[in-house]
Image (cartoon, coloured by chain):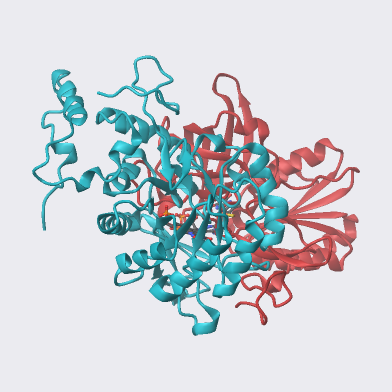
Chain colours: A red, B cyan
Amino acid sequence: MPVQVRGEVLGVRRAGQYHVLTLTAPGIPELARPGHFVGISVGGEGTGMILRRSFSIHKVADRGPYGGTLDIAFAVHGRGTAWMAGLDRHDSVDIVGPLGRPFALPREPVSCVLVAGGYGSAPLFMLAEQLRERGCRVDFVLGASTEDKLFGVLDAKRMASTLTVTTEDGSLGEKGRVTDVLPEIIERLGSSVVYACGPMSMLAAVADTAAAHGAYSQCAVEEAMACGIGVCMTCVLPVIGDDGVTRMLRSCIDGPVFRGDRVRWADVGTVPADTWGAPAGGHR
Amino acid sequence: MTAVIGYGPVGGEPGEPRIDMKTWIGDWVLPSPIMTASGCSASGKELDPFFDLTRIGAVVTKSVMLAPRSGRATPRMAETPSGMLNSIGLQGPGIEAFVEKDLPWLRERGVRAVVSIAGGSVEEYGKLAQVLRYCEEISAVEVNISCPNVADRGQVFACDAKLAAEVVSNVRRIIPSEIPVIAKLSPDVTDIVGIAYAVVKAGATGLSLINTTLGMVVDTETLRPALAGVTGGLSGPAIRPIAVRCVWQVHEAMPDIPIIGIGGIGSGLDALQFILAGASAVQVGTMTFNDPSSPQRVHTELARALAERGFGRFTDAIGYAHRPHDEPLSEFVADAWAEDDRAGEGSDPARPLSSGAAG
Ligand SMILES: Cc1cc2nc3c(=O)[nH]c(=O)nc-3n(C[C@H](O)[C@H](O)[C@H](O)COP(=O)(O)OP(=O)(O)OC[C@H]3O[C@@H](n4cnc5c(N)ncnc54)[C@H](O)[C@@H]3O)c2cc1C
Ligand SMILES: Cc1cc2nc3c(=O)[nH]c(=O)nc-3n(C[C@H](O)[C@H](O)[C@H](O)COP(=O)(O)O)c2cc1C
Ligand code: FES
């Protein structure tokens, strides 16, 4: 069950192209699991920005005097995130969370590959820790267009058995995309599960690659959200259910983590004609 | 000053005046004038973690159609200055699944439920009403007529007085008379009073004002419309003045018809504007996305704002801004501001209630 709390900013620090915001958020760190996200009010009193911004929970910590704290890692994208980058220590922020459905963890100590594009790695470090605690092998693949868009390279190196980096311009690691290196990694390590977070096009390719190489995949998607709590129906995408029927599911409440083989990646942004309740011919 | 023992968190604290927040829509008595708005609270359950849904007047459920609906393609929303555009396309499970799965939860929790219905033809609204007439413990039916009429080249029911009246009279005929039928109107008309007259004549117990107003955003990166549906409904504080104007005009024309004010309400003072303009209740929509507990908060803030202005009963404030210019403030309001003066706070007793600059 999510809660709505006022948190206090403990710090905002730069991490390459990104900012890491540390907040107290009474009640949220204790409930947070890897893949959960929070909704943050931006703009302050009297702002015209009425919608909350969504961010994956990056880290949680038990910091004695402050109670639990949480970190989010974000890129400045537009006005809301620019406002967040300007927050100061002791500023107060309204937070709703933890939201969404987190990553499912394997019962057995299997081998897992964690794949991220850009800041998509933010939620994967908490996941890596919990997988390791269960005795799972953890390997990381981090990709971005260029070196300074990678996030958490050092953390990944510290936590993973192996780290593979790809950049499209070859500025760090292998030149290319995460899916160029993924098949070989899955095959070599006998990975059973691929966890992924990043842009939709990357998730689509990772889900396909995992399936082609016999691995199960769990993908955290990023859809524009107006409410983040399941009341508005803006954040939907076509997902195949257990009964084989495609429905437009809310990524804030039924996701953001979905089974990679259940999302109709090629149809995201449309309503396929065979979707439950679709008008004849579907919607583009 | 009238002291009334009433419902609500305000008054619970010692020293605070008790305000009677009861209101009426026809014969239906609500303990609070605050409701959620259709499409902004799903079927209620999702808001349960954030506040006690039984403490507000009612939950208005997402407009439901006869058959399941997938809704439109994404992107379905764009943020705009103090507002947002949406183009959801009435995604929903269809009336049968709704009645089977969603209504029971509200009933078990003791949440007052207003069921919003939407159709593509006069007959579809009738069929929806047929299903609902046998459902126990529905507090009211809200008829969302901002839908295109399939039979008439997509002419929106709410934009045509005759069509709107046909829909409402068809629903009214079927829904048991003790259950209010509320017609929800669109602001996208030349003469909202004309439409209001027509649906009231057709049997509407009350009116919900307003639905979203049609808008559009062009994405300057992709150089295309921002929404997959091209146009969308504008909501939020950006439309509040339009909504207050609609409430004012309709209340002036039909002071006895209960109006539910909707549009950008996010605080007690926002709600108070609608009440003073003539609304008997209000709905909190888009601002719930900003603050999921806002319906409860708006109730508390409104009660406090009424007390500060000397109102002992919520209903005394309904339409209060319509009083003639030469009519003095009611004794209780004047007293309240005078008390403030003695306390050295407010200076001009008429200031907070004056109509502001003309022009
Ligand atoms: C579940 C989830 C997790 C996310 N996690 C992170 C994260 O860990 N780090 C990070 O940097 N970003 C993350 N994002 C993206 C982040 O929400 C957007 O970058 C942010 O909302 C942009 O706000 P803005 O005001 O700066 O941009 P603007 O473009 O001005 O925002 C305008 C509107 O569009 C929405 N919007 C714009 N871009 C996005 C987007 N990419 N995704 C969703 N909504 C968007 C905004 O919420 C806002 O309502 C996540 C998004 C989701 C849905
Ligand atoms: C995402 C969204 C979905 C909506 N869906 C419905 C709906 O299904 N039926 C309806 O009558 N109104 C719907 N509305 C309109 C609201 O109920 C309300 O009339 C309007 O948004 C103005 O109020 P607000 O500014 O408080 O949101 C919707 C509004 C939004 C933002
Ligand atoms: S963002 Fe509102 S339902 Fe998902």
x and y percent of residue A192 in the render? Answer: 88, 54
Q: Is residue A175 shown to the viewer in this render?
A: no
Compared across the picture, whether A268 is left or right of B54 comes to right
Identify the image quadrant of residue B198.
bottom left
Compared across the picture, whether B193 is left or right of B179 comes to left
Is B334 above or below relative to A134?
above
x and y percent of residue A169 in the render? Answer: 60, 68
Residue most extreme to the bottom: B153
> Quadrant location of the N terminus of chain A?
top right
The residue depicted at 27 percent of the width and 44 percent of the height is B276
> Quadrant location of the C terminus of chain A?
bottom right
x and y percent of residue B170 in the render? Answer: 53, 68
Identify the image quadrant of residue B316.
top left
The residue depicted at 24 percent of the width and 31 percent of the height is B309
Is A231 above or below relative to B333?
below
Q: Nearer the viewer, residue A220 or B66?
A: B66
The residue depicted at 32 percent of the width and 51 percent of the height is B256
Q: Nearer the viewer, residue A284 or A145?
A: A284
Q: Nearer the viewer, residue A205 or A6?
A: A6
Q: Indicate the quadrant of ligand 3 in the picture.
A: bottom right
Compared across the picture, whether A103 is left or right of A226 comes to right
Q: Is residue A182 shown to the viewer in this render?
A: yes
Badge count: 0
